[in-house]
Image: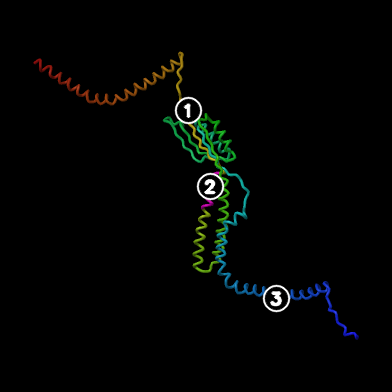
Amino acid sequence: MEPGPRQRRPTTMSPTRSRALIASLSLPMALMLVACGAGTNGDSKSSAGSGGAAGSAPADSLSSDFGSANDAAAKAPASQAAAIQRAVIATGAEQLTSAHLGDARLDAIDLVTGLGGTVANEQSQSDDHGRLRRVDLSLRVPAASFERALDGLARLGTVQHREQSVQDVTTQVIDNDARVRAQEASVESIKRLLRRATTIAEIISIEGQLSTRQADLDSLKQQQKWLADQTSMSTIQLTMTRPSRTVEAGTGFFSGFGRGWHALGRSTVAVGTAVGAVLPFAVVLALLGVPGWLLVRRRKVVAAPAAEA
């Protein structure tokens, strides 16, 4: 039997050669896709930058700036956070009695001014002889010297009443400071927006927003100023009076002599007061009675010879 034609065996490719072939074919395709994608993105970006920026950006800029101005209150405190410091408002009151009220008043003023404080208000009352009877002082002292001032004032006389109170306003101070910073940022945003306005309607609308926000900022700054004053300077209400005199009953010659002398003085004053009250009536009676008495006496004298005749 003759041998037939020789059959060809199918060729097979090794795994290494197949991976190399796939890699060689995929690399050019990947490069082409990247180039196409870059060209497409570049065209879209260039079209947006040319046509979109020229057309929509001016129209959307005002609204975006309004949004940034409204969001300033939320962004400013986070970027300008400050360290928390405790803030308190301290107030006190003292009532004293002193036999030398004028000297005690001067000493109280000297004490407060020596501590760096001031006299915010003063009211004084005097008796019939011009001597001080009562002094009311409203004193402001640095918060750090509050206790020292109270103790120093207590030594100027006999303390009848003393009280003090402390109010913690740390949260209020922090909140107010944050609001001020946020409102300042908001006002600056509105000012920048006003400089970019091109139409009358835009200018009127932005100026209305600016006036409202500026008024809110001024109010917040006034509150901030008041809090700073109250927390840095403490208030003390000081009332000083003269002690009431009390007469103690004593014994012995001198005690009796003293009481008798005072009784004589009071009796003399009483008699003088009575004489002074009666004297005007006596003068009037004398002016009217003496002429009448003389007239009656003269008639009697004239009538006597006539009767004898």
- Whole-Å distance between the Cαs marked 2 and 3? 67 Å
Q: Position of residue 286 (x, y in %)?
A: 24, 24
Q: What residue does disc 1 label? A: 243
35 lies above or below 277: below
Q: Residue at x 48, y 38 (%)?
A: 122
- Return the disc, 1 or 3, that comes first in the chain's sequence: 3
10 Å crowding of disc 3: few (<14), some (14-19), many (20+) = few
Residue type at numbered disc 2: Trp
Please tell me whether mark 1 or mark 3 is closer to you in this view: 3
Residue 183 placement, left or right of 308 = right
As for residue 229 lying within the magenta part, the answer is yes
Evaluate if marks 1 and 3 touch, with contact meaning CB atoms under 8 Å apart: no
Residue picked out by circle 3: 36
Mark 2 or 1, nearer chain start: 2
Which region is colored magenta? Answer: 219-230
**Where does the C terminus fall, quadrant-wise?**
top left
Q: Quadrant of residue 246?
A: top left
Main SS category, magenta section: helix
Q: Nearer the viewer, residue 140 or 37?
A: 37
Q: Quadrant of the N terminus?
A: bottom right
Residue 211 picture location, percent across and down? 50, 59
Q: Label 2 neighbourhood size at 10 Å, few (<14), some (14-19), many (20+)?
A: few
Gap in angstroms between the C-alphas marked 1 and 3? 104 Å
Residue matched to label 2: 226
Q: Is residue 18 above or below residue 226?
A: below
The amino acid pointed to by label 1 is Pro
Pick whichever of labels 2 and 3 is earlier in the sequence.
Answer: 3
